[in-house]
């Protein structure tokens, strides 16, 4: 039975595997560090981007927050208007049925409901 001595080949392949493993780990660490620096500093790592130019665009959710704040302001105004309409309707000097005041109350209530629904739909998407 003939045998071959494979120790040298084994040592060579083991050393190559260890070296490749270390190179991969170093590359991953470099990429991770680059990603972290890009996130922290706001600098784009895009090779096509101009050097030294930082992108300072706000996140997309900022637009949603602004729209919702605007809707909340509109709702507050409409609620004040609705409260005054209710006060006028309840404190009227005559007891006649005025459908105009009730109609205005219904319209204002529907407007508030529409703004709330639109705001919830924007928030969900």
Image (cartoon, grey):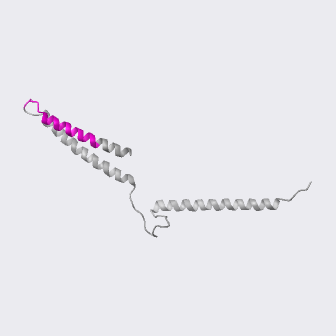
Vertical side of 10 occupied by 123: above or below? above
Q: Position of residue 83 (x, y in %)?
A: 19, 39
- Could you say where residue 14 lies in the image, as x and y percent from the top left? 74, 59
Q: Is residue 51 above or below residue 36?
A: below
Residue under the image location 24 percent in, 39 percent down = 110
Magenta stretch: helix, strand or loop mostly: helix
Q: Is residue 22 left or right of residue 118?
A: right
Residue 84 forms part of the magenta stretch: no
Residue 106 quadrant: top left
The outermost residue toward the left is 94
Q: Nearer the viewer, residue 104 or 43?
A: 104
Farthest bottom residue in view? 51
Q: Position of residue 81 (x, y in %)?
A: 18, 42
Could you tell whether 120 is left or right of 43 in the image?
A: left
Q: Residue at x 89, y 56 (%)?
A: 3
Q: What stretch of residues is rendered in magenta?
A: 94-115
Front position in the image: 15 or 117: 117
Q: Residue at x 28, y 46 (%)?
A: 72
Decide whether residue 109 is among the magenta residues: yes
Picture residue at 65% right of the left edge, 62% below the top: 23
Residue 16 vertical position relative to residue 98 in the rendered view, above or below = below
Decide if residue 97 is on the left or right side of residue 66.
left
Residue 78 on image: x %, y %: 21, 43
């Amino acid at each position: 039975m003939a045998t071959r001595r494979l120790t040298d080949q084994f040592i060579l392949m083991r050393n190559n595997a260890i070296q490749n493993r270390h190179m991969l780990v170093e590359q991953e660490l470099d990429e991770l560090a680059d990603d972290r620096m890009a996130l922290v500093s706001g600098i784009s790592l895009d090779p096509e981007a101009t050097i030294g130019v930082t992108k300072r665009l706000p996140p997309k959710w900022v637009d949603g927050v602004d729209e919702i704040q605007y809707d909340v302001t509109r709702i507050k105004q409409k609620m004040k208007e609705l409260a005054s309409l209710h006060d006028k309707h309840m404190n009227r000097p005559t007891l006649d049925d005025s459908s105009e005041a009730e109609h205005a109350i219904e319209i204002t209530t529907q407007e508030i409901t529409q703004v709330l629904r639109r705001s919830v739909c924007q928030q969900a998407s």
